[in-house]
Image: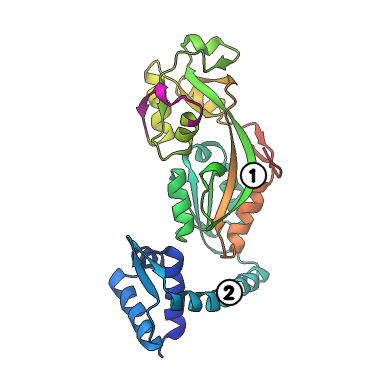
Amino acid sequence: MKNIDLQLRQFIAIASAGSVSKAADVLGLTQSGLSKQLSNLEDGLGQTLFERHGRGVVLSSAGKTLYDAIKPSYDLIDATVVRLREEQGITEGRLRIATIHPLSSYFIPGVIAKFMAQRPSVNVSMLGRSSPDVIALVETGKVDIGFVYDEAVATAEIEETILFDEKMSLVVPQNSDMARADSVDLGNARLALVVFPAPYSQRRMLQLHGLDSHAVAEVETLDAMLKLVSLTSGQCILPDHISGAALAEYGLVAIPISAPLLRRRVVAIHRKGRALSSLANLVLEIARAAIEFRGDVIAPRTAGP
């Protein structure tokens, strides 16, 4: 059988993605081209390896037997290649990071800045997305590492590393009556919240605490949220680590929330069964360290909430 190694790699990609089209995107191939390679492998083995299931595929009995036999071996090969490259001190290449929007305003820029100082020849790309989108990008291998809130991780295909906990604050215009308060009880406040759409972790947090009924507008970016709050009498709920300078640019201030307690845990995620590259490992090391950003020190967490 010709190209058996390539076909087996492609077979693993399809099984991991659960879809020929998703695997084709990850591999940079056309769906028809990948389907043809799969057919060639099945013809050579005389076995059907996948069964159609909804919009995707699942392993057949023969496919599961093949997957269980070859996946550990390819994982070992990949891990060995990564280790050998690390021993040579890889200083060039490409690093792809995905992060939820709030973290891109106060946490990830500091991480990337320290990384670039140590690896100036590496090409770094950062994607800002919702939590589900970040997880999907990690699952499909389109990014090397992602940063999300832990409650959004509900898949066995992802491994997470705890970084830190953050509390939330109510952000209001400087000329608002609330701006003079030392703290605010959201249960007693008159709220008109600008929020992220439903897939976002922040929106689910509001729903969990019965605050979603106060939503009056939806936006998809942090800048749009801050600008809309600055132009209206509305408010938004954001991490208290977002710097005062960033808020002051929009004429806003952050008020501590006394009740309910709104706290979330930030985690780094990567695809289970795929060894982190040396570059992604370095980013993780930097992220796990205490990060100082515009006067805020974020301490890493290693225990429960």
Does the magenta segment cover residue 210? yes
Q: Residue furthest right?
A: 303
Q: Which residue is mark 2?
A: 72
Work out how far the residue at label 2 is from the one at label 1, CA to CA, in angstroms.
29 Å
State whether residue 64 appears in this view.
yes
Pick the quarter of the image with the C terminus.
top right
Amino acid identity at mark 2? Pro
Which percent across, then down, holds residue 229? 41, 22
Q: Is residue 190 above or below residue 28?
A: above
Amino acid identity at mark 1? Leu
Q: Residue furthest bottom?
A: 1
Q: Which residue is mark 1?
A: 163
Q: Is residue 194 above or below residue 163?
A: above
Which percent across, then down, holds residue 179? 52, 13
Name the mark nearer the viewer: 2 or 1. 2
Q: Which residues are magenta?
A: 208-219
Does the magenta segment cover residue 28? no
Figure quadrant of residue 234:
top left
- Secondary structure type for disc 1: strand
State whether residue 252 appears in this view.
no
User: What residue sits 38% from the left and 88% below the top?
Assistant: 44
